[in-house]
Amino acid sequence: MAEERLIDDDKDRKYKIRKNEDGEDELYIEGGDGEEEIGFEVPEFDTDDEEAAVMTPEQLAERERRREEAEQARLKNLEERICKAEKLIAEGDYEAAGYEVLNAEKLDEKNGEVGALKLRAFSCDFTDFTKTEELAEAAEIVRGFADGDIKEQLKDYAQNVLPVLQSATVERDALEKQNEDKKNERREFFKKRASKSSVWFITSLAAFIVPLIIAIVFSTMMFAREDGVYLILTAVFAGIAVVTFISTLITAHRYWEDLRNVKLNERNSSTKLGRAFEQKKIEVERLTLIYAVVSGNSDGKADNDLS
């Protein structure tokens, strides 16, 4: 005998779910002259779905139908965008193709076919590599989500990427050498200045501490003599301490500036040449990823081709 559960009661109509012979849930309505079977299945929903918890079986089925229609519409739109992008690329209209690719990407961010089209559109079919950031993002999508056929088709473009990668690598190495040479020149100069200013700072600090201590000592007994000698000495050494304290502040600031220059010299972002090297370094990393994906190197490296 089938198992039955009462799930709703609307006057004479009773909505029930029963288990069929296969153990699946079936919905039927009992009421009036007999049983009326319903022509849809009750969709399953997540236990955290608060909306579904208060919906009738008809509402659940309707919601599921709308979701399926929306998904079908999304897939149809995605397919149309992909076809249009392919057509535009074939016609050489890469700007319009890029627009279609971006719209397709919004519909499915993890679509390997869209990633491959983005590579082609944003590189003008692998003839322009100025948009390395967008191309690297597309390469990541291709590496993670494209099937074997798509990756195999992209291998034909590997020969277009390799010369660009090699040229960028040469430029990066040249910028790195220039940057390091300039750093070495400045490093010696800044270290000498920092060493010199540290001596001045320590000297001025000592010149401040010594009269300060003497002034403190005399201050403890400045009224011990009636002629006021200790009082005068306290005032004199206190004055000297004030002057040397100002000198200490000046030398301390100079020492701090020199130390700061030593640290800044090691940062590439502190010079135009260093920033150019960092930018070229990032460009090479992105081109390496693009070439690795296009050529089919799953490890994401292209060292063998560059050596």
Image (spheres, helix red, strand yellow):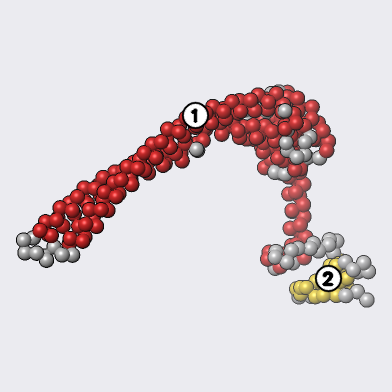
Task: State the image coordinates of residue 249 (x, y, percent, origin top left).
Answer: 29, 47
| Local SS, label 1 | helix
Q: On screen, 147 above or below 240? A: above
Q: Is residue 49 left or right of residue 156?
A: left
Q: Compare residues 226 and 304 and report the one nearer the observer.
A: 226
Residue at image coords 50%, 38%: 267
For disc 1, the neighbor class at 10 Å (few under 14, some 14 to 19, many from 20) is some
Q: On screen, 178 above or below 265? A: above
Q: Compare residues 130 and 89 and report the one nearer the observer.
A: 130
Does the residue at mark 1 contact the one at mark 2 (Cβ under 8 Å)? no
| Local SS, label 2 | strand
The residue type indicated by label 2 comes to Ile
- Does residue 239 appear in the picture of this structure? yes
Q: Quadrant of the N terminus?
A: bottom right
Residue at image coords 54%, 27%: 178
**Most extreme residue toward the left, as rendered?**
227
Q: Quadrant of the C terminus?
A: top right
Task: State the image coordinates of residue 203 (x, y, percent, origin top left).
Answer: 30, 45
Residue at image coords 24%, 57%: 213
Q: Is residue 270 left or right of residue 7?
A: left
Mark 1 vs mark 2: in front: 1
Residue at image coords 77%, 39%: 298
Asked where in the image residue 15 lies, by quadrant, the reply is: bottom right
Task: State the image coordinates of residue 262 (x, y, percent, origin top left).
Answer: 44, 39
Q: On screen, 132 above or below 51? A: above
**Tag shown at residue 219:** none
- Does residue 58 appear in the picture of this structure? no
Q: Compare residues 226 and 148 and report the one nearer the observer.
A: 226
The residue type indicated by label 1 comes to Lys
Residue on which disc 2 sits: 17
Task: State the image coordinates of residue 281 (x, y, percent, origin top left).
Answer: 60, 33
**Tag shown at residue 182:** 1
